Image (tube, rainbow, N blue to C red):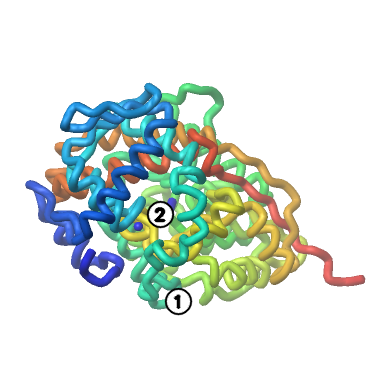
Amino acid sequence: MTTAGSRPVEAPRQDTVEASRQDTGPVRRPGVAAPPPSSRVRTAVTRALVRRALERLPLRARFADGTRVGLGGPVIDIHDPDAFHHRVGVQGLVGFGESYMAGEWDAPDLAAALTVLAGDAARLVPAPLQRLRRLWAVRRPDVQRNTPTGARDNISHHYDLSNDLFALFLDDTLSYSSALFQSFPASWPLLAAAQHRKIDRLLDLAEVGPGTRLLEIGTGWGELAIRAAARGARVTTLTLSREQQALARERVSEAGLDGRVDIELCDYREATGTYDAVVSVEMVEAVGEEFWPVYFATLDARLAPGGRVALQAITMPHDRMLASRDTYTWIQKYVFPGGLLPSVEAVEEVTRAHTGLRTTRRDAFGAHYAETLRLWRERFTERADDVEALGFGETFRRMWTFYLAYSEAGFRSGYLDVQQYLFTKEDPTP
């Protein structure tokens, strides 16, 4: 999953993650403790623009001075209007997220409020300012480029936080991607079965069975590899996270499948060999646009003739991808450095231009991701004391809550979607 001073803009690396983990009191995260400098004029202009946007939204914004704005609906309580407008004026949506992390605003139903904003995302910024986006939007720092070295750092920033943290809000399968439910509303006891349903559908698409040589790009914590090996496949799975590799190896061993699964600490670009099937679940979002051709070419190169690729990917509308692809977002700054969601059109363009892979089937199920995220968010909230006991402070907990609610809102509003693809290789012979 992927989205961002007077100080230079840079992605928080592992040292800032560690600083956040030690904080159990007030806000201490760099760039969040105090709003960045801004002129009174800029803040006043931001105040006017925010009010204008809120006046036409089905929201109720309640300001500390008693002002009420909006057409009604989910509530946003802005406790410190000056700091809130200050941050938004300087850093846009990055500042909006940081203001929540700093406790300057809140919402009784955060996901509902963010769903309204996500549904109107393309129109929140006035058209004249949209056309000048390149002048005011913060640019993504070069340090987040997904070169072989950068990709390792970016993956470590998120997935090496703590296996225990992820275990607190994920189900027993430790699957960190959209589940596939039979009915709504979803409930926690059904999540593990829904994750298995998603995995089994991907394995079925790739026709994984006894004797299949399977390459998985992006191990997670090993559930897909375990289920594939249990079908009789011989699995090679790649990860850049040492934490994930260690726990996935334990889980494979506990399942009695040591001889059927190899878990390699390896960049996808370093993969070798050919396979009957390749599966990759929500990995392309972390690749970065400039490396999409390399990523899909790798899938193509590793696939044996007659083989099949099953891919699960989060997507966004093509026009929004084009408008925001060079912008530094809150998600990129705090959660997924270097990430970018592709559009369906972008996937089609890249595979046609750089590979022999062709889309044989594509199924969208964004509503299922919204429910998956809701269950994760509720679980995370219920276990806040356990998260704190792991050493993750208040700022981190607000950041993670915002991340889960922000992502859920994207799917509930239809701004985001998730796809399962089946690719087959075009016959090169005339």
Residue 11 against residue 279 in the figure, above or below: below
Image location of residue 33, percent across then percent down: 14, 54
Q: What residue type is labelled 2?
A: Thr
Q: What residue type is labelled 1?
A: Thr
Q: Which residue is drawn at 25% across and 51% down?
A: 43
| Residue 3: mark | 2
Badge 2: residue crowd in 10 Å (few <14, some 14–19, many ≥20) = many
Please give the residue where the numbered disc 1 appears in the rendered image: 147
Between 380 and 301, the one nearer to me in the picture: 380
Between 112 and 298, the one nearer to me in the picture: 112
Q: Which residue is drawn at 61% across and 41% down?
A: 201
- Looking at the rendered image, the quarter that the C terminus falls into is bottom right
Image location of residue 362, percent across then percent down: 68, 46
Q: Which residue lies furthest to the right in this view?
A: 430
Between 265 and 382, the one nearer to me in the picture: 382
Residue 309 location, quadrant: bottom right
Instruction: Label 2, secondary structure: give it.
Output: loop
Instruction: Label 1, secondary structure: give it.
Output: loop
Is 42 placed left or right of 336 in the picture?
Answer: left
Residue 144 against residue 360 in the figure, above or below: below
Residue 330 location, quadrant: bottom left
Answer whether residue 31 is visible to the viewer in this image: no
Q: How far apart are marks 1 and 2 (CA)?
A: 19 Å
| Between discs 1 and 2, the one toward the N terminus | 2
Residue 392 against residue 195 in the figure, above or below: below
Answer whether residue 150 is visible to the viewer in this image: yes
Badge 1: residue crowd in 10 Å (few <14, some 14–19, many ≥20) = some
Q: Which residue is drawn at 44% across and 71% down?
A: 146
Residue 342 location, quadrant: bottom right
